[in-house]
Image (cartoon, rainbow, N blue to C red):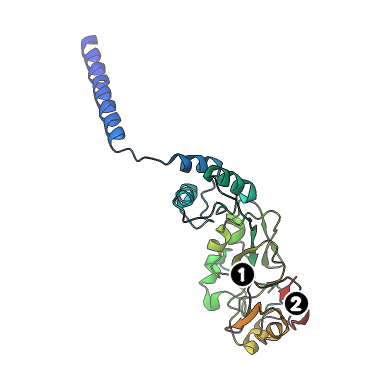
Amino acid sequence: MDYQGIITAVAVVAGCGVVISIFLSIFAARFAVPVNKKEEEIISVLPGNNCGGCGYPGCSGLAAAIVGGTAEVSGCPVGGKDVADKIAKIMGVDPGQFVRKVAFVRCHGTCQMAGEYYNYTGPKDCRSEAIAPGRGSKMCDSGCLGFGSCQKVCDNDAITIVDGIAVVDPEKCGACGQCVKACPMGLIEIVPYDANVRVACSSKDKGNITAKACKAGCVGCGICAKTCRFGAITVTDNLAHIDYDKCTRCGECAEKCPKKIITV
């Protein structure tokens, strides 16, 4: 066996490795991107979910925005008040009032309430049914399809499918927004945790059409808007909307709603 050849080969490979490592070290030092110390500290206290619920590309994006002054210290919905307080301490500012938020599914079209055009037999997935004729088998083309695409992406197990519609457990929800992105019908919104008065419908069809499609649909009658003494409710595109900055959570609108789709 030619040991001299083996030794030479090993020496050449080792030498190449040394040369390459030296070049890499030089390039790493030359092209290194300086990282703000406060950004690193903020990243260390963020949950690390990189969910995008804050509206920025991951935790590092939020950290940079906070340091740059374009995002609030309470910008992480998943971290909550504890994380907001830690970030405020790092930034040397007052944490202010943290508003906890949760996801809400704007639909009460259960199997008993919503009519169906046909029996859907395709893949048991909301995205698949959403491209079927009529945007699914339900007569309401704005209703929850009930196959749990939102449930599958929820890391907190906060979503369950009950009687054909998705239901969010507010105590488990971290308001990361993954379910909002996953819903092909655009039914899920992030609302204040204490906003206990909510419109559980997304249909913008005329009242008579909605009424035929679902017993729990908003018909745009405007009774809720007339009842509200604080101007917190408006009816746009045949659908009631609540301005949570004006809403006092009194529940009078829910009492007057003839379709009982304003929940308390």
| As drawn, 139 above or below 55 | below
Residue at left offset 64%, top offset 60%: 102
Q: Report which residue position mark 2 lands on.
A: 254
| As drawn, 7 above or below 231 | above
Alpha-carbon distance for marks 2 and 1? 25 Å
Mark on residue 145?
1
Q: Which of marks 2 and 1 is in front?
A: 2
- Residue most toward the front? 93
Q: Where is residue 48 in the image (x, y as percent from the top left)?
A: 53, 45
Q: How many marks?
A: 2
- Disc 2, SS: helix
- Residue most toward the bottom? 208
| As drawn, 228 above or below 70 | below
Q: Position of residue 126 (x, y in %)?
A: 57, 66
Relative side of 157 to 7, left or right: right
- Disc 1, SS: loop
| As drawn, 30 above or below 241 | above
Residue at left offset 70%, top offset 82%: 224
Which callout, 2 or 1, points at the residue further toward the start of the chain?
1
- Residue most toward the right? 255
